[in-house]
Image (cartoon, rainbow, N blue to C red):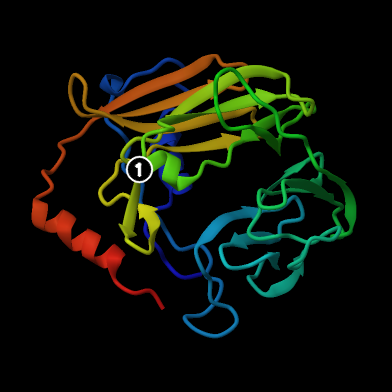
Amino acid sequence: MRRTPLTPTLLLGLLFLPYCDRPNGTGSEGELERLVGVVDQRIGTMDGELTFATVIRVRKGPDGRIYSGEFGRSDIRIFTREGEPDGVIGRAGEGPGEFGGPVTFGWIDGRLWTWDQRLGRLSWFEADGSLAETLQPARFQHGDDPLPFTPGTPLPGGTFLTSQSIPSQMVTDGQITSTPTLRATVEGEVLDTLWVRDLRNQTLGVMSGTGGFFTSQPFAQAPAYIAATDAEQIVIVDWTHTPSPLIRVTRRSFAGDTLLSADFPFSPRAVVPEEVAAQVRLAESPRE
């Protein structure tokens, strides 16, 4: 597998591991352990069919095989424990067992679930890859939020984490400044609010008289989070500058209880205007 910069998921793991046994701990209790990554396995090549695009999720299944979901693909690639290709699940389309684009996935009770946000559909697959069932959960409104929510990631016990599609234009215009992660039933009954993500200064709109496009805001300190569905916990890594610069790691249960809150000070580096201008020019450059 090609080496890429630390993903939010890996960053969460590195920051969280030293504090797994410290409920309600803080960064002042000790130094953050330095972890050194070691290449355990390599999958794929630098060119050809076994190259990887932007990987959304890589997980080891209950059978020991490795499953990969990527942008630009409408399937889940499977590899043996030795890293050899071992088939796919799904294909492009809108029929049963097909995906409208990249999907997120996981396992509950030995079955693989997938969430296809483009089609708004959940699918469950048996261990042999055969389609077991599908569900098209209904969207629902919550509070004063102008955009609907959809039950997306399934959880043990039959509840779901919600998904919300937010147009980038509404973010850059300031119409939407945050989005909550909810735990809800498939009928749309909200049980808990697990986290509210700040969307301000996260999206850059590059517009002209005839149109434009949206991309990530250069140098944005976007929060990262991962939902550990098997442990029924969510882990959040966020940045704060009030009253002083801190990286804050928070672990919460799906019932909304805070299990851990740890702060780690850091020294931010000032971003000079020339760096910002260079990133904007890069975003504006023609795309192949």
Q: Is residue 230 visible?
A: no
The residue to which callout 1 is attached is 202
Nearest the viewer among 152 and 231 is 152
**Residue at x-position 46% and y-position 70%:** 2
**Residue at x-position 60% and y-position 82%:** 49
- What is the three-letter code of the residue carrying label 1? Gln
**Residue at x-position 33% and y-position 19%:** 26
Nearest the viewer among 256 and 228 is 256
Q: Is residue 82 visible?
A: yes
Q: Classify the position of the C terminus by image quarter.
A: bottom left
Residue 103 drawn above or below residue 83: above
Q: How many marks?
A: 1
x then y, percent, for residue 183: 65, 24
**Residue at x-position 42% and y-position 33%:** 175
Nearest the viewer among 65 and 183 is 183
x then y, percent, for residue 102: 63, 59
